[in-house]
Each structure stands twice: as structure tokens, then as C-alpha cells.
Image (tube, helix red, strand yellow):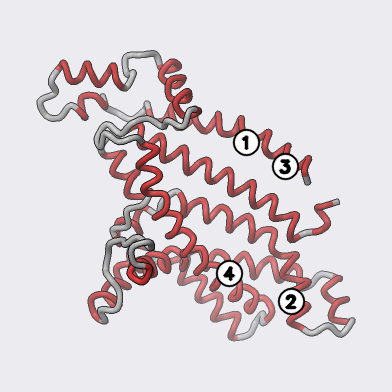
């Protein structure tokens, strides 16, 4: 396992270098001069010249990339020209919101998707199987923004049980925080649960037909033990990979859902930064989310060793 970890870590460094080059390079392809956009309507030449110097826009592209990477290695992601705040500070402000929303959504998805997939596989051809497949079809085909609006109309406008939008820190009021986050978390978790259900069902159906499962049943083991201890554990490998990828997607910011519920997370931050041509913020947020993706994939690979003893040898 240690050798495997070293090999995976050795691939992370060149991957991050390539990702940073891609982020910086694609950012430069955006049309327009950011200095002129940030200078306002008057576009004072002295202000434009100052912004060019501050943002190193007059320097060659490789040198600008070196400036940026040098700052990143020191923990400096740059400064937002709009807000006059360090990008790292903005990221740290929005990160807890996005992490909380992602973890709540993933918890809902796991609580619904995996049991539904197991029930569907075990009861193949039954009405339980049909109901689970109908749920998966619903989750995959329902747009997040539409479901979010329906939930607001029902639980906020009609029933008045939950706030329609906004965010309250859990450190200020945990009850108000959960009330504000439960609807957007369900909207995101609903779609992921449908995907998890389909993958869990497929993986379980393959495992349930394996020889060692038939042997376990022949030994007289109870069906819950056969399904949960022997079958599910060996079916978890593709589910872990999918869960890590979906969690990475959530951490990158659910743009539409955050806009519908006015959640001040990564999604809203990056959209506002793109419209404002705030390059430093866009680069910083995308770099953080890309790093999160890579890290989650590494954790998923390590989790394989926990659920599959054959890999430890």
C-alpha cells in the first residue's frame, strides 16, 4: 500500500502543474482587456497603466505564469481587484459554505441511493425494483433549478416551514443553518442519489451472481449477512469512485442551485468573478477545486484497500 501511495503522489505533482498551466492559459483566452474593464466607464489612461503594471499584463505570458505560480507556492493566490481582498481570504470565506452544502448533499445521496440500489438488485423484477428505477429516472431527468423552485413554492411560500433563500452560519444558529441548507442539499443530493442507485444496482447484480455469494448462501448464512457483508463490500469499488467524483463536483460549486437559493458558495463566487473579469479570483477558485478533485481521487484509491482485502497483498 505504501508503494502504491508513493506512485500516486508522484503522479499528483505533474498533474497539478499541467492543471495550473491549463487554468492560467485558458484564462488568457477570454476576450477584452481586464484593465480597461476594471478601470470603469471613464477608462483613465493612468488607471489602465497602473492596472497593467499591477497585474503584470505588459509582461510576456511565461513570465506572468511564473509570477502567479511563485505566489501560489507561497500561499498567495493573488488579490481580487474588485474587492481589494486576498483571493485566499475569499476562498476561505466561501469554502466552509460549499463544504457544508456538499457534505449534506452527499449524505442525502448516500442515504437514499445505496439502499435503493441494494433493494433493487436483491428484488430484481419486483415492484421494489420498478419503484427504485422510477426514482432513478426522476432524479436524472429533473433539472435542479426547477426542483429548487418547486421546493421553495411548497415549503417556503405555501407551508412557510423553511426559508426561501439565504445562509446562516452554523456557529451563529445551527437550527437556522439547517433550515436554510436542507432544500438546496436535497436538490443536489436527489440527482446524485439517482446515479448512485443505478451504479449500486449494477454492481450488486454482478456480485450477487458470483460463486462466493452462492457458497455463502449454501453455508446457511442469513440473507442480510450475505448481501451486506459479502456482496456489498465487493460491490463498493465503483461506488467509491463515483462518490469521490460527485463530491468533487459539489465542491466545485453548484452554480444553478446556489443561485436559486442565494447560497454564498464557490458557485456564486466564480460566476461573479467571471463576469467582473476578476482573473485572480477565477484562477484561485478553479485551482482549489481542481486540487480537491485530485485529492478526492487519491482518497478513493486508498479506500479500495479498506474494502477489498485482495489489493493489500
- Which structural element holds mark 1? helix
Res. 115 mark? none
Residue 197: assigned label: 4
Q: Earlier in the sequence, mark 4 or mark 3?
A: 3
Image quadrant assignment for residue 63:
top left
**Given contact means CB atoms under 8 Å apart, are the residues at marks 4 and 2 in contact?**
no
Q: Position of residue 170 (x, y in %)?
A: 38, 63
User: Marks 4/3: CA distance?
Assistant: 30 Å
N-terminal of the pair, mark 3 or mark 2, is: 3
Residue contact at pointers 3 and 2, CB within 8 angstroms = no
**Mark 4 residue element:** helix
**In the picture provided, is 195 more to the left or to the right than 172?**
right
Other residues around mark 3 within 10 Å, as few (<14) / some (14–19) / many (≥20): few
Instruction: Tell me the tag on residue 227.
Output: 2
User: x%, y% of residue 102?
Assistant: 46, 58
Residue at disc 3, secondary structure = helix
Give the tally of numbered discs.
Answer: 4
Q: Which one is nearer the viewer's eye here, 213 or 160?
A: 160
List the residue tagged with mark 3: 5
Residue 12 is labelled as 1
Viewer-proximal residue, 199 or 153? Answer: 153
Q: 166 or 42, which is in the foreground?
A: 166
Q: Mark 3 or mark 1, which has the lower sequence index?
A: 3
For the residues carrying marks 2 and 1, which lies nearer the camera in this image? 1
- 206 above or below 159? above
* Alpha carbon distance from label 1 to label 4: 30 Å
Pair 4/2: label in front: 2
Check the image and report above or below for 16 versus 243. above
Which residue is at a point 46% across and 32% down the rendered structure image?
Answer: 75
Q: Residue furthest front?
A: 172
Amino acid at each position: 500500500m505504501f508503494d502504491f501511495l508513493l506512485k500516486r503522489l508522484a503522479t499528483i505533482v505533474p498533474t497539478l502543474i499541467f492543471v495550473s498551466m491549463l487554468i492560467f492559459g485558458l484564462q488568457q483566452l477570454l476576450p477584452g482587456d481586464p484593465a480597461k474593464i476594471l478601470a470603469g466607464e471613464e477608462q483613465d489612461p493612468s488607471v489602465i497603466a497602473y492596472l497593467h503594471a499591477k497585474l503584470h499584463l505588459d509582461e510576456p505570458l511565461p513570465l506572468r505564469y511564473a509570477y502567479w505560480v511563485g505566489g501560489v507556492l507561497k500561499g498567495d493566490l493573488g488579490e481580487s481587484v474588485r474587492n481589494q481582498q486576498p483571493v485566499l481570504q475569499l476562498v476561505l470565506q466561501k469554502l466552509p459554505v460549499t463544504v457544508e452544502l456538499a457534505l449534506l448533499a452527499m449524505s442525502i445521496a448516500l442515504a437514499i441511493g445505496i439502499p435503493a440500489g441494494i433493494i433493487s438488485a436483491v428484488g430484481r423484477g419486483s415492484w421494489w425494483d420498478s419503484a427504485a428505477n422510477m426514482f432513478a429516472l426522476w432524479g436524472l431527468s429533473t433539472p435542479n433549478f426547477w426542483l429548487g423552485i418547486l421546493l421553495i413554492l411548497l415549503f417556503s411560500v405555501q407551508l412557510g416551514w423553511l426559508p426561501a433563500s439565504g445562509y446562516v452560519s452554523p456557529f451563529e444558529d445551527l437550527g437556522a443553518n439547517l433550515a436554510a441548507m436542507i432544500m438546496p442539499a436535497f436538490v443536489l443530493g436527489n440527482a446524485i442519489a439517482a446515479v448512485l442507485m443505478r451504479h449500486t444496482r449494477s454492481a450488486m447484480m454482478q456480485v450477487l451472481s458470483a460463486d462466493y455469494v452462492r457458497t455463502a448462501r449454501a453455508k446457511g448464512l442469513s440473507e442480510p449477512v450475505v448481501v451486506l457483508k459479502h456482496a456489498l463490500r465487493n460491490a463498493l469499488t465503483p461506488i467509491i469512485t463515483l462518490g469521490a467524483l460527485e463530491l468533487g463536483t459539489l465542491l466545485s460549486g453548484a452554480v444553478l442551485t446556489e443561485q436559486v437559493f442565494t447560497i454564498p458558495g464557490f458557485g456564486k463566487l466564480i460566476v461573479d468573478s467571471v463576469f467582473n473579469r476578476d482573473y485572480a479570483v477565477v484562477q484561485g477558485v478553479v485551482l482549489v477545486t481542481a486540487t480537491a478533485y485530485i485529492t478526492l481521487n487519491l482518497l478513493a484509491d486508498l479506500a479500495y484497500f479498506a474494502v477489498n482485502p485482495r489489493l493489500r497483498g
